[in-house]
């Protein structure tokens, strides 16, 4: 067969991997052993529904064969194997969406080791130590074997080949400077350090001296906690998650009762690149009595906890359960409820240390908050574990419980405001009365906030309300003069007519102190921020909440306008100032203004006039 080219991303990726000068080249072995172990998992599972298929394939194992004379190293498994299409799809293209991200990330921060695993491009790490890679493989259930050969630069070639059993041999023709990887002492050391937890025997082929079993090879989660070291726990995490950070949280438990299961779960310390991809798939692996079943059981973990990595193993599920049967299975639902409960409990414990908890919150908080919306059973618990910016403190995030502990006398609601970013929100005119009365307001800036505030009606008896829906008396004691009622009415009528296409109402308000105007919506309508979010996602075409322009009757500018609104000679000025005020209110809400050149021209104009007068 003629030579095939790698897909462009693969070439770029290989280029980065091969040319990255870093010392941890040995990770390639861990990657290839991980793949071999996955391949055995897959065949074991396949055999459950196709009995007899693997009966002549021998006990599952992974064999490592160094050859110092040839300067080669071969990693063999008797797992699922690959057919021609698999070879093209898995080793010639990277079908996964992560590849382009990988290339971009690697260019930006240069830490290839972390990224190789994260983006599922482990196989290619072989080219760090090999100048040529030969993959000989036969797919379970098929008769023809194939050989894939590549130097990692120009492309690959696939030819028909011979292989007796199902499985894969990956033969690396080592580079001159990678001779170490034929040294059995070194190999034994790397395997013990990084792959000890692998569920299958890893065998070192010592040639004439026979074979040696290198790893302990029992499923780590079945061992006693006391017998497992931190390093072993971490290596297992690296294996199952393909992450190379140190996990922020680890939870190893055995649940007993109506259904028994073991869980070994981790929360990473770094967010994966795909945390916010639309499919939001959970990533726990399900085992039945140590046999891998699937890592795509959606119902095993809610989407808002999709960043939790690890395994669940239960002997109470039937072994031959099909993946379809796993969806909406009552036992799975029980496991999920129990596991979520444990995770939330552990988070509660960890939340007592603010700085430590912030490491989690800043990484996964946005995803976690989806739970307030999604997890009907644990809504209040998820809310209590959530943290928010607020007006009470500039840096420190607050919890709802803390908020409640600071309510003012007579305050019966929890108040929030939503917007694009915290610094802009802090200056929103809507907050002025709250500041004057020392009432705390939560500053919510993540899109998901718009949704959970709609479903969490109250927290521990405190209704959750947008500042525009404040029903307590926000009247502030003032000694300043107020525009007189009659001219104020004329002004509001005038503005309402002038802006009839942009706002539904113009009303005086008691809520402002420093600002002359502010823009808000009617009670119960979609907030301006949410509307903007939807518009940005092309979710909204015709419907828009009607706006209310609130004016501050104590503000000198409003008083002046009210006095001048009937003065024919000042008509143009009154109109211009009104226009500037509405624009100002829109800007404070993060909204676009109709005519920005008018705004900037007039603004400079009025500033200059004021300046010349005072000079
Ligand atoms: P990942 O393992 O994260 O998916 P890799 O680049 O390491 O990414 O491997 C790509 C794919 O190639 C695997 O998903 C698998 O389908 C296939 N593959 C790799 N090694 C083997 C193997 N030893 N046996 C069978 N399939 C394999």
Image (cartoon, rainbow, N blue to C red):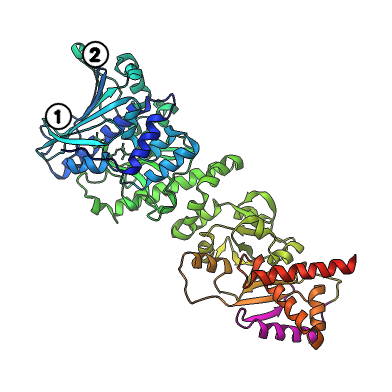
Q: Residue at x 51, y 59 (%)?
A: 448
Q: Position of residue 333 (x, y in %)?
A: 34, 53
| Residue placed under numbered mark 1 in the picture | 58
Q: Residues within 10 Å of mark 2 (few under 14, many from 20)?
A: few
Residue 125 can be seen, yes or no = yes
| Residue placed under numbered mark 2 in the picture | 69
Q: Quadrant of residue 147?
A: top left
| Residue 501 lies in the magenta-colored region | yes
Looking at the picture, tell me which residue is in the foreground, 386 or 560: 560
Q: Quadrant of residue 489?
A: bottom right
Q: Position of residue 197 (x, y in %)?
A: 33, 28
Q: Residue at x 37, y 54 (%)?
A: 279
Say above or below: 599 vs 176.
below
Given this view, does label 2 or label 1 mark the residue nearer the observer? 2
Say above or below: 464 vs 237.
below
| Residue 479 lies in the magenta-colored region | no
Quadrant of the snapshot with the N terminus: top left
Q: Quadrant of residue 24?
A: top left
Part of the protein shown in magenta = 482-510
Can you tell me which quadrant of the image ligand 1 is in?
Answer: top left
């Amino acid at each position: 067969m003629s030579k095939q080219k790698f897909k462009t991303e693969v070439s770029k990726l290989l280029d980065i991997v091969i040319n990255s000068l870093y010392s941890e080249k040995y990770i390639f072995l861990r990657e290839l052993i991980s793949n071999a172990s996955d391949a055995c998992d897959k065949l074991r599972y396949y055999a459950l529904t196709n009995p007899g298929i693997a009966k002549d394939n021998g006990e599952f194992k992974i064999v490592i064969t160094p050859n110092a004379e040839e300067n080669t190293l071969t990693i063999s498994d008797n797992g699922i194997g690959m057919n021609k299409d698999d070879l093209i799809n898995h080793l010639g293209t990277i079908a996964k969406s992560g590849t382009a991200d990988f290339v971009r990330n690697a260019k930006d921060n240069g830490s290839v080791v972390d990224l190789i695993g994260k983006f599922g491009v482990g196989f290619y790490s072989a080219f760090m130590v090999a100048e040529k890679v030969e993959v000989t493989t036969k797919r379970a259930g098929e008769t023809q074997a194939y050989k894939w050969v590549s130097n990692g630069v120009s492309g690959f070639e696939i030819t028909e080949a011979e292989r007796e059993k199902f499985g894969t041999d990956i033969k690396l023709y080592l580079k001159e400077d990678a001779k170490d990887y034929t040294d059995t002492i070194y190999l034994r050391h790397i395997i013990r350090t990084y792959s000890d937890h692998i569920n299958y025997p890893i065998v070192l082929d010592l040639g004439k001296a026979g074979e040696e079993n290198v790893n302990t090879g029992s499923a780590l989660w079945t061992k006693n906690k006391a017998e497992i070291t931190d390093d072993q726990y971490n290596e297992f995490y690296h294996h199952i998650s393909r992450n190379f950070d140190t996990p922020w949280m680890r939870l190893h438990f055995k649940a007993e009762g109506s259904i028994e299961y073991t869980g070994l779960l981790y929360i990473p310390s770094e967010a994966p690149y795909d945390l916010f991809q639309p499919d939001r798939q959970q990533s726990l692996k399900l085992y039945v009595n140590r046999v891998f079943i699937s890592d795509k059981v959606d119902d095993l973990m809610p989407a808002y906890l999709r960043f939790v990595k690890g395994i669940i193993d239960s002997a109470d599920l039937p072994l031959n359960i099909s993946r379809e049967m796993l969806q909406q299975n009552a036992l799975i639902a029980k496991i999920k409820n129990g596991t979520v409960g444990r995770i939330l409990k552990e988070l509660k414990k960890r939340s007592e240390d603010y700085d430590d908890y912030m490491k989690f919150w800043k990484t996964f908080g946005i995803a976690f908050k989806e739970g307030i919306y999604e997890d009907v059973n644990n809504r209040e618990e998820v809310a209590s574990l959530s943290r928010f910016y607020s007006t009470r403190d500039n840096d420190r995030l607050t919890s709802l419980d803390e908020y409640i502990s600071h309510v003012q006398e007579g305050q019966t609601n929890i108040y929030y405001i939503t917007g694009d970013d915290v610094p802009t929100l802090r200056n929103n005119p809507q907050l002025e009365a709250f500041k004057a009365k020392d009432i705390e307001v939560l500053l919510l800036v993540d899109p998901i906030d718009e949704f959970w505030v709609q479903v969490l009606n109250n927290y521990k008896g405190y209704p959750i309300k947008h500042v525009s829906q404040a029903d307590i008396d926000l009247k502030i004691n003032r000694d300043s003069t107020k525009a007189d009622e009659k001219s104020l009415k004329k002004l509001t009528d005038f503005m309402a007519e002038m802006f009839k296409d942009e706002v539904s109402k113009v009303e005086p308000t008691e809520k402002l102190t420093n600002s002359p105007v502010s823009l808000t919506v009617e009670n119960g309508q979609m907030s301006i921020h949410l509307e903007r979010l939807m518009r940005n996602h092309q979710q909204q075409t015709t419907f828009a909440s009607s706006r209310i322009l609130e004016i501050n009757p104590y503000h000198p500018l409003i008083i002046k306008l009210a006095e001048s609104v009937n003065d024919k000679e000042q008509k143009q000025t009154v109109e211009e100032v009104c226009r500037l005020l509405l624009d100002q209110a829109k800007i404070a809400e993060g909204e676009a203004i109709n005519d920005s050149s008018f705004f900037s021209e007039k603004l400079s104009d009025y500033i200059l006039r004021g300046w010349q007068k005072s000079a």
